[in-house]
Each structure stands twice: as C-alpha cells, then as structure tokens.
Image (cartoon, rainbow, N blue to C red):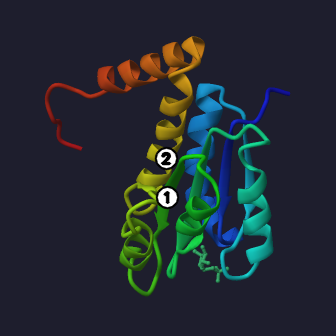
Amino acid sequence: MADVKVGIIMGSQSDWPTMKEAADILDTLGVAYEARIVSAHRTPDRLWEYGKTALDRGLQAIIAGAGGAAHLPGMMASKTRVPVIGVPVQTRALSGVDSLYSIVQMPRGFPVATMAIGAAGAANAGLMAAGILALNDPALADRLDRWRADLSASIPQEPRDE
Ligand code: RP5
C-alpha cells in the first residue's frame, strides 16, 4: 500500500458522511489517506498522540472536521506543523455557523486553513490536500489538473429548463 500522506480526522462517527466527501476526492485522485475518529473533548489523549506523531509518520496534510464547539482542527494545529485544513461540519442547532466560528478564528501563530461549512467544504479540503501534495508529485499534479479541467468542461455555456 502507498505511504499515507493525508490524515482525515473527525470528532465523531456522525461527521463521517460529511468527511467522506474529502475521502472520495482523495480516492478519485489516487491519494493514500487514513481516516480516524479523534475528538478534542472525548479523546484528548488520542488527539495529542496523533498530533505528536503526525510529522514522523509522514503526514503532509491533516483534514480535520468537527461540528459545534469544533476545537479539533485548532488543537491539532497547536500540536503539529503539518498543515491542518479545517472542515466545519453542519450542525442541527446552529447550521454549522458555530463550527465555522470555532474553527476559523485562530490566534496569530497557529493557522487552520478553514473550508466552507459542510459537504462542499469537505470536498474542497480533499482538493486542498491534493494541491499541497501535488507540489512535490508531478503525476498527482497531472491528475489534479485533469480533474479541474474535466470539471470546467462539464459546466454548460447556457442554462436549461429542468
Ligand atoms: C463534535 O460534536 C463532533 O465533531 C460532532 O460534529 C458533534 C456531535 O457529535 P455526536 O454527538 O454526534 O457524536 O465533537
């Protein structure tokens, strides 16, 4: 199996339907990843261990999704310099605005690249991670360029009645 270079982590099993969008993109682009449940609040020791070992294990990007009091991406960014891409998971109570605000307002010094709320944000996180890896992987760069060109080509010039 190819070396895992991307970690997808999430606060709960309930985040997986959203975070799977990132995994699907990475599958499509042929990027090896791992997916783990790592909760800032429920499994803080697991979070710490993951962050402590991320660099030595060869991870080059971490996609972190959480909802509500979404502290996972920021705490992970505090523990490792591996770039962290945050995905605010949509919530029932506050529609994910709570998640977004929890993730996006990091203090100077410990950035999280924050995506849009929900499925589109998760898919974009996969693309962002692929873009980071593609800087040093010409074959992946080709696949990503082709993926982007195909998406552009699929957009019709004119709208039609549906
Ligand atoms: C967060 O709380 C998780 O990231 C999830 O989005 C949210 C709710 O978790 P569950 O109660 O569904 O496990 O920690």
Q: Quadrant of residue 55?
A: top right
* Rendered view: 96 above or below 111: below
* Relative image position of residue 2 (x, y in whole percent): 80, 26
**Beta carbon at label 2 within 8 Å of ligand 1:** no
Q: Which residue is mark 1?
A: 86
Q: Which label belongs to residue 125?
A: 2
Q: Which mark is residue 117?
A: none
**Quarter the N terminus occupies:** top right
Three-letter residue code for mark 1: Gly
Marker count (numbered): 2
Q: Is residue 20 above or below residue 39?
A: above
Q: Nearer the viewer, residue 7 or 48?
A: 48
Residue at 58%, 64% (x, y): give it: 78
Ligand 1 visible in quadrant: bottom right
Residue at 39% x, 77% y: name it: 95
Q: Residue furthest front?
A: 109
Q: Label 1: how many residues lie within 10 Å, few (<14), some (14-19) or many (20+)?
A: many
> Do labels 2 and 1 touch, CB within 8 Å?
yes
Q: Residue at x 57, y 29 (%)?
A: 133
Q: Above or below — where is 130 with respect to 91?
A: above
Q: Quadrant of the C terminus?
A: top left
User: In which image quadrant can residue 148 be found?
Assistant: top left
Nearer to the camera, 141 or 109: 109
Q: Which amino acid, mark 2?
A: Ala
Q: Residue at x 41, y 74 (%)?
A: 96
Secondary element at tag 1: strand
Dot 2 surroundings within 10 Å: few (below 14), some, or many (20 or more)? many
